[in-house]
Amino acid sequence: MNKSRMEALTDGIVAIAATIMVLEIHAPDNFTFDSLRAQVPAAIAYLISFLLVMLSWYNYHMMFARAKRVDLRVYLANTFWLLVLTGIPFATSWVGEYPTHWQTELTYMIITALWTIMYSVTEFCLVLSNPDLDEKINQESVVTVIIRYSILLMAIIVLPFWPPICLTSTFVLMIISVRRNFKDEKQQS
Amino acid sequence: MNKSRMEALTDGIVAIAATIMVLEIHAPDNFTFDSLRAQVPAAIAYLISFLLVMLSWYNYHMMFARAKRVDLRVYLANTFWLLVLTGIPFATSWVGEYPTHWQTELTYMIITALWTIMYSVTEFCLVLSNPDLDEKINQESVVTVIIRYSILLMAIIVLPFWPPICLTSTFVLMIISVRRNFKDEKQQS
Amino acid sequence: MNKSRMEALTDGIVAIAATIMVLEIHAPDNFTFDSLRAQVPAAIAYLISFLLVMLSWYNYHMMFARAKRVDLRVYLANTFWLLVLTGIPFATSWVGEYPTHWQTELTYMIITALWTIMYSVTEFCLVLSNPDLDEKINQESVVTVIIRYSILLMAIIVLPFWPPICLTSTFVLMIISVRRNFKDEKQQS
Amino acid sequence: MNKSRMEALTDGIVAIAATIMVLEIHAPDNFTFDSLRAQVPAAIAYLISFLLVMLSWYNYHMMFARAKRVDLRVYLANTFWLLVLTGIPFATSWVGEYPTHWQTELTYMIITALWTIMYSVTEFCLVLSNPDLDEKINQESVVTVIIRYSILLMAIIVLPFWPPICLTSTFVLMIISVRRNFKDEKQQS
C-alpha cells in the first residue's frame, strides 16, 4: 500500500487527538483568577498527555522512516495504535476532573500502557514485513527496561496511598524516553 | 484536477470524521468504575465505527492508487462518499446511546449501507474516467457477495427480536472484508 | 513562500470547517424516528453547506493549480477567505435551528456572499502576482453572470415572504456552478 | 528526522487550533439580530486570534523553509510552540466572554507573549542545528524592537483603566509585523 498516504492519515488523526484534548479545558464561568484554579489539574493532565502524544509520535515516525514496505498487517496494527490513542483524550479528561482518585489515575495508566503495547505490536508487524529492519530498530538497554518496569511497579504500589503517582510516573517515563532519544541521535551522527 | 490534493483533502475529512466520534464518549460525572459502565455501549459503537472507517479507507485508497486520472465526476462522487461518511458520527452517537432499539440500529445500518453504495458509485465513476482500470479492480467472488447479502438479510429478519444485530453484523462484514483484503494482498505478491 | 505548504494548511482548515458543521446535528434525546424529524432542517442546512464548501474548494484548488507564484499578498487574501469560511459553520448552525426566519437566512446569505467576494479578491491577488495567468482563468459568460445576479435579486425580493429562499437559491447557484465546471472541463480536454 | 513529516503534523495542529476557536461562537438561542450582539466580543476575539495564528504561521513556515536540518531539539521546541498555541483557543474563549476585565485580557496577553517566546526558542534551536542559517534569518531593526516593547509597556500601563487594550495592542503588533513581512519580501525579490 501507499506508505506516505497512510502516514498522512495517521498524522491527521494524531494532530486531532492531540488538539481536541484542549477542548476539555473550558473557559471558566467567571472572570476571576480564582475560577482558573479549578482548571489547574485539567491543564496539568493536558500538558502531560500532549507531550506524551508528541513524543511517542517522534519515535513512531522514526520507526516508520526506516521501513520501506507497509502492508495490510502493518496498517491494521497502526489502526489499533490510533484507536487506543483516541482513548487518551477520554482518559485525560476524566483524570483531569478527578485527579486524586485511584480509579481515574489507574484508567489513565492502563490506556497509556495499552498504547505502548500497541506500539510494540506495530513494531513487530513492521519488522515482519521488512526483515532487513530487525537490527536497525534501536533496542533499549537492559538497564532502561529495568528502570521502566521499576517505575511502573512503584506506581502500582504507591497508587492506593497517592493516586497522582500515575500521571507523575507517566511524566518521569517520558523524560527518560526523551533522554534516550537524545543519546540515540548523538550515536547516529 | 490535482489527484494528490483531492486525496489530501479526503484524508483530512476521513481523519476528522474518525476522531470526532470519540468526543461523544464523555468522561463520566463521577470517579467510580460503575459510572464507566454507562459508557460501554457508546465505546463499542465507537470501536466498530472507527474500525469501519479505517478499513473502508484502506480499500478506498487502494482503489485510487490504481487510478491515474481524476475528474469532476469522480470528485463529485468522492464528495458524496464524504458526505455520507460524516453521517456516521451522528449514527454512532445515537446507536451508542440507545443500542437496544431497532430505530437507532436500523439508522446505523442504513447509513453504512448508503456509504457502501457511494463507494460503488465512486468506483463506477473512476472506471469511467480510467477505462484501462476496469479489470484491475478486484471483483468480489460470487460466494462473498452471497455471504454478504445473506448477512444483511438475516440482520433485517433478526432486527425486531434483537436490535443489536445491526452493529454485530457490521462487525462481521468487516472481518470478512479484511480477510478478503489479506487474500488479495497475498495474490498480488 | 512555499506554495504546497500553504495549500496543505488551507486544505486542513477546509476539511475541519466542512466537518465540524456535522457536530451541530446532535443525536436526539430519544430513540424514536419522530425525534429525528426535529433535526431535518439542520441536516438540510448541513447538506447545502457541505456541498458548497466542497464545490468552492474545487474551483479554488483549480485556480491555485494554474498559479506558479504565491506571495504574502496572496497568503493574506487566502487567510481572509479561510476566515469567512469558518463563519459558515456558525451561519449553518443558526439557519438550521431557525430556518423560517429571515434574520438567519439573510445572515447565511451574507456570509456566503462575503465568501464569494473573498474568492474574487484572492483571484485578483493571484493574477497580480502571476501576470501570465490573466487570460487563463476562465471568465464567466455574461449570461451566467446575469443569471447569477437575477437569482440573488429574486432571493432578496422573496425573502420577506418565504425566508428559506436563501438556502434554496444557494443550492440553485451551486448547481449552476457545477454545470459550468463540467463545461469547462469538457472544453479543456 | 523527517522534516516534511514534522511540518505536516505541525500544520495539522495549527489548522485545528485556528479552527476550533470558532466552535466557541455558538449560534444564539434566538432568531433576532439582537441576540447576535451578545456574540460580538467573542467574534472580535476570534478574528484577532485567527489572524494572529495565520500570520505567525507565515513567519514560522518561512523560518523552517530556510533550515535544512531538523533534530530532536528543534522538534521539542516545536512541540512547546504547539503546546502554547493550543492555549490560545482557551484564552480567546475566556477573553471573548469577559472582554472588559483585566484578568482575562492579561491572560490572553501572557499566552500570546509566551507563544512569541517559544517562537524565539525554536528559532534559537534551529540556528544551533543549522549553523549556516545564522545570518539569513532576518533580524528586526532596533526601531521595530523599541516600538514593539513600547506598545507592550503601554498596554500594561493602560490595562487597569481600559482592559481591552490587550486585544487592541495584539492587533496593532500584528499589523506592524505584516508591514515588516511585506518589506522583507520586497527586499528579497
Image: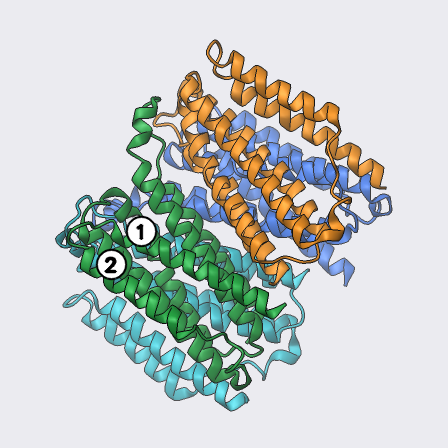
Chain colours: A blue, B orange, C green, D cyan
Q: Secondary structure at mark 1?
A: helix
Say which residue appears at 27% left-offset and 62% top-offset.
Answer: C110
Do residues under tags 2 and 1 come within 8 Å of each other at their CB atoms? Answer: yes
Disc 2 chain ID? C
In this orientation, does residue D173 appear? yes
Residue that lies at the very extreme toward the top in this rendered image: B161
Query: Does residue B148 lie above or below C100 as drawn?
Result: above
In the rendered image, which residue does mark 1 sit on? C168
Label 2: how many Cα within 10 Å (few below 14, some 14–19, many 20+)? many
- Image x and y of residue C37, in percent: 30, 31
Q: Amino acid at mark 2?
A: Ala
Q: Is residue A44 rendered to the left or right of residue C64?
A: left
- Image x and y of residue A10, in percent: 61, 47
- Image x and y of residue D135, in percent: 58, 84
Between A175 and D63, the residue placed more toward the observer is D63
- Image x and y of residue C46, in percent: 37, 46
Q: Is residue B131 rendered to the left or right of residue D42?
A: right
Q: Residue C155: which disc? A: 2
Q: Secondary structure at mark 2?
A: helix
The reply to whether label 2 and label 1 mark residues of one chain is yes
In this orientation, does residue D86 appear? no
Q: Amino acid at mark 1?
A: Thr
In primary-sequence order, the first of circles 2 and 1 is 2
Q: Residue C64: which disc? A: none
